[in-house]
Amino acid sequence: MDITRLLPEDTPMMDAFWELYTDVFEHDQPGSPPAQRKSAEVDIANLRSDMRQEYHLAHVNQQLAGYVRLLFPLLDNKHFMYVNGCVRPEHRRRGVGSELLELALRRGRSCGRVTIGAHTSEPLPGGPYRSTSGRDFLRAKGFDLAHSMRDFSVDLENIKEKIEEDLVDEFLPHAWEYELLSWSGPTPEEHLPAVTALANRFVSEVPLGDLALEDKNIDVERQRAAESLDAVRGRTNVSAYARHPASGELVAHSVISVDDESPEFAHQQVTLVHPEHRGHRLGTLVKIESHRLLRREFPGVRTLFTSVAEVNTHMLAINERLGFVEVDRQLDFQRTI
């Protein structure tokens, strides 16, 4: 077995890697939104200032059998590293994954990392097929489950009229002290300080289970860098916020991402409400506002995906009312290096 580093300038190997990735992705998670090559190219080129990434490829008898991706946070959580990857089904249980993991552990030790995290999925009863190879492999290698989420999807047209309008009529009287703002693309300059302040407030509010992660520090420069990188990836964010006019603060948000390579799909990112402003139905209202802007800006989007931490019972209930359907379960594992 030969393991080599994938370099962005090696176009033939990039093509081979992408064929491997998409083949395994479609085998292990059929029906999921397609992977985005442009986004992967950004990661392989190491364009992020807050994360160093490495891709290593495993060849068996000159055939590309698997890969591992290593992610090293550079600004926060310098004790931690992430790993993900895959092995072709016909090469599983032959030591390929074990060799790639050993490489990851060696690199982690050499970089002074203490904990390694990995992400995979598993099926839900009655849900679509999901391979459990990743889950079983991680458990066998001493990883413990630290956090879990549920994936959902919804047909936007099915909830456009009745469900959303009924919820807005029901919830808006609870939010009479607030106003809704929304935009597509980078954050307008006049809202950037408030958006950054809210992002920092939310860092400690995102459910992370038992993951050994520290809070991030997000400033204006880091926020702008992330938005610029989204543009390079071919990704547009549709954002909705709730503002408290009396204080001028932004107190709730919901963001949806659309990639150029798959304009029929969209992904709803984190929806959160400031703890001091909960109880006014703001989470549901900003979520619906983002749906409405998404329909106006990207009328070709048909399916919206989102993930919710299993401990977040409030957001799970909101998704149920909005008509989202459970797809699968996402699992975050970790172990010491």
Image: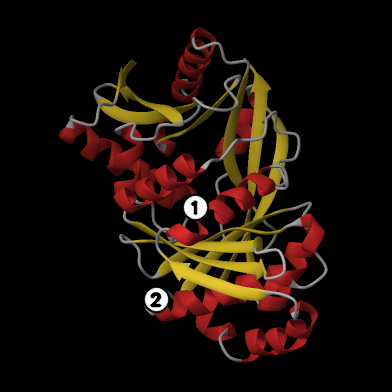
Badge 1 crowding class, 10 Å Cα cut-off, few under 14, some 14 to 19, many 20 or more, is some
To which quarter of the image does residue 124 belong?
A: bottom right
Residue 158 lies left or right of residue 166; in this view the side is left
To which quarter of the image does residue 300 belong?
A: bottom left
Badge 2 crowding class, 10 Å Cα cut-off, few under 14, some 14 to 19, many 20 or more, is few
Q: Assess whether mark 2 and mark 1 are in contact (beta carbons under 8 angstroms).
A: no
Tag shown at residue 29 = 1
Q: Earlier in the sequence, mark 1 or mark 2?
A: 1
Residue 79 image offset from top left, x and y in percent: 61, 19
Residue 9 image offset from top left, x and y in percent: 18, 30
Which residue occupies 18% across, 29% down? 10
Position of residue 3 relative to residue 6, above or below, is above
- Which label sits in the foreground, 1 or 2? 2
> Label 1 to label 2, Cα distance in Å?
29 Å
- Front residue (pair 112, 184): 184
Pointer 2 residue? 297
Which residue occupies 41% across, 52% down? 26
Residue 238 lies left or right of residue 181; in this view the side is left
Which residue occupies 63% across, 34% down? 136
Residue 103 image offset from top left, x and y in percent: 46, 15
Which residue occupies 70% across, 45% down? 148
Residue 293 lies left or right of residue 277; in this view the side is left
Give the amino acid type for the residue marked by disc 1 in the picture: Gln
Location of the C terminus (image quadrant): top right
- Front residue (pair 44, 137): 44
At mark 1, the secondary structure is: loop
- Front residue (pair 226, 300): 226
At mark 2, the secondary structure is: helix
Location of the N terminus (image quadrant): top left
